[in-house]
Image: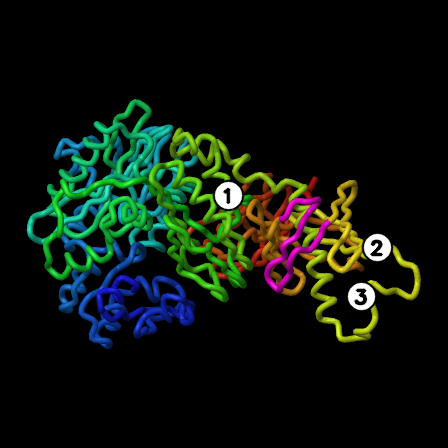
Amino acid sequence: MRTCRAMGISTVAVYSDFDSRSLHTRSADEAVHIGASAAKDSYLNIDKLIDAARRTAADAIHPGYGFLSENAEFAEACSSAGITFIGPSPDCIRKMGSKMFARERMALSEIPVVPGSHTDEQTTENLIKCAEKVGEPMLVKASAGGGGKGMRIIRTPSEIRDSIDAARREAEKAFGDGTLFFERFVERARHIEVQIIGDNHGNLVHLFERECSVQRRHQKIIEESPSPALSAETRRRICDAAVKAGKEIGYTNAGTVEFVLDGDGNFYFIEVNTRLQVEHPVTEMVTGIDLVKLQIEVAEGKRLPFTQKDVKQKGHAIEARLNAEDTRNGFVPATGVLRDLELPDDFEGLRIDSGVESGSEVGIHYDPMLAKVIAHGADRETARLKLIRGLSELFAAGVTTNREFLIRCVQSEDFANGKYDTGFVERNLEELTAAIDPRETSTAAGVLAIYLTKRKQEDSEILPQVSANYRNNPFRDPSTKFESAGATIDVSWRQISSDTFVVTRGDWQSTVQLVSFDRRTLRASIDGIQRAFRISGSGDHFVVQSSSSSVELSRLSRYPKAAGASEHESAYAPMPGQVLKVLVEVGQSVTAGDPLVILEAMKMEQTLRATSDGVVETIRVQIGDLVVPGDILVEISAGRE
């Protein structure tokens, strides 16, 4: 929409029930309601999208990079309605949108492909036979989509059936197509993709490569260009292969040819994404080319305004995706209301693309990505340091995010040296998701105690002429209890002047002098070192963030309820979501690790498993129920003799 506005083009948004007040809805000149919150009732409904275009006299549709962006039927429906589809032709989408067909086509063109197998008969039993031909380790992948949806790694034969079922469900929900195939899993591979763009006059060029090897759950989280893994010769060969792939199918508009690179420097084709990519800003920053503007101009019938020799890589760019997810709990999606969102101050080489703002609700229906932070510098190290700075200054309170995880990734030695692959996160998971340093938690609790004290003093209207510290009887230092990540933090403090406090937690003690204070930011000198803290709270729940950490704290009641003895184990919802499957029955015996319930949130699945042996006593949910974190789903009693 920003690009269209700069080009003098009016915009129309479409929105579901859930998105009626979203940023994208309010950013457009007009917005059309297209249905219920579930994607199948709105953003995946072709008839409603075409009707919205007709009702507003829109003459073109940009499909974005999700939902129907790689759907040939949608592109054809646009054409039939006399509406320009800003993307490749339906024929190209159909050819390359089917990952299975794309593999066969590239192999015939002598472009190396990862060994794999597929079947036209998509019954579970046929798929199992197909998988057995490939062998472990392998990937089961959705033929119709990307973005890590509908993908599972299989390392043992016992995982095949469940992986097929889960991948199919995810693919059907995300793309409306559950077709699957199998591919050999390349260990320690690097994920390299090449941006291509072609016009309707026979011109097609590449805009160099991006590296997308930092992934979790097969979804990219950090991307960069140029790739630190490619030599000049390998870069030339892989970019030439991408252009050859595009020309083989007469590709037009923007697309991405994706490869894996093995440890010996050999690359293999895996798929073509027939759309704009989430990480397109990385390419824009190193080439200076506005890809969205170019997409629109190509769709208007214009020629590419440059040739291959005109395209140069200038400097280095790195992008990190800010997601609503709990990195310390298996990256499960997080929901809530984004109470406060403060983006970094602008400085040269930093770009923020965000789809949310303060007050935005983050729900279970769509992808968890909130924003992208992109840094550009003259070299990789400059870009890396700028990205760390940008992430450090970003503040998002009210919804759990992966901010600290991203900072740790970019700061890690392997990433700094460019020595990483698609297994980077898994191998370094403990380090990347480790709990915050206890000293940081103590500091945050102490700062919050002072913050609440200062607020109380400012808000007080009773006996304003009496000193804030006055008591008419001796009393110990004031104290309070907070809870953070399951631990109780008991903090006491003594105010020794209007702006100086001594804060104590156990054997930790600091002298804290306030430098400045307002309702959002507290700057303090802690044992002689000044730091700024951003604080946001709702009720008794707070976020205290500095440049190095973000700590969530809950103020505990002074009079907690006595804990009662529990006679059974309860399986709780670890995340908000919808119940897809209940895998047990009342009276069934289970052992630790057995699957109980499958939840779905933000197009991803999470299997809830038993934590102890026993017998299912009560099932409190059924298929279709919406749950929130902490809801009891299944109760398990001790095993019967």
Q: Main secondary structure of the magenta part?
A: strand
Answer few, some or many: residues within 10 Å of disc 2's Cα (few below 14, many 20 plus, some between 14 and 19). Answer: few
According to the picture, the residue beneath numbered tag 1 turns out to be: 405
Report the front residue among 390 and 222: 390
Circle 1 Cα neighbour tier, 10 Å, few/some/many (<14 / 14–19 / ≥20): some
In the image as oriented, which residue stretches furthest toward the top? 264
Quarter that holds the C terminus: top right
Highlighted range, magenta: 512-530
**For residue 470, above or below residue 274:** below
The residue that disc 3 covers is: 468
Residue at 59%, 58% (x, y): give it.
620
Question: Residue 299 at what x, y percent from top left?
Answer: 15, 59
Q: Decide whether residue 386 is among the magenta residues.
A: no
- Percent of width and height locating residue 191: 32, 36
Identify which amino acid the numbered label 1 is placed on.
Phe
Gap between marks 2 and 3 measured at Cα: 14 Å
Decide which of tag 2 and tag 3 comes sooner along the chain: 3
Query: Which type of secondary structure does the marked residue at label 3 adopt?
Result: loop
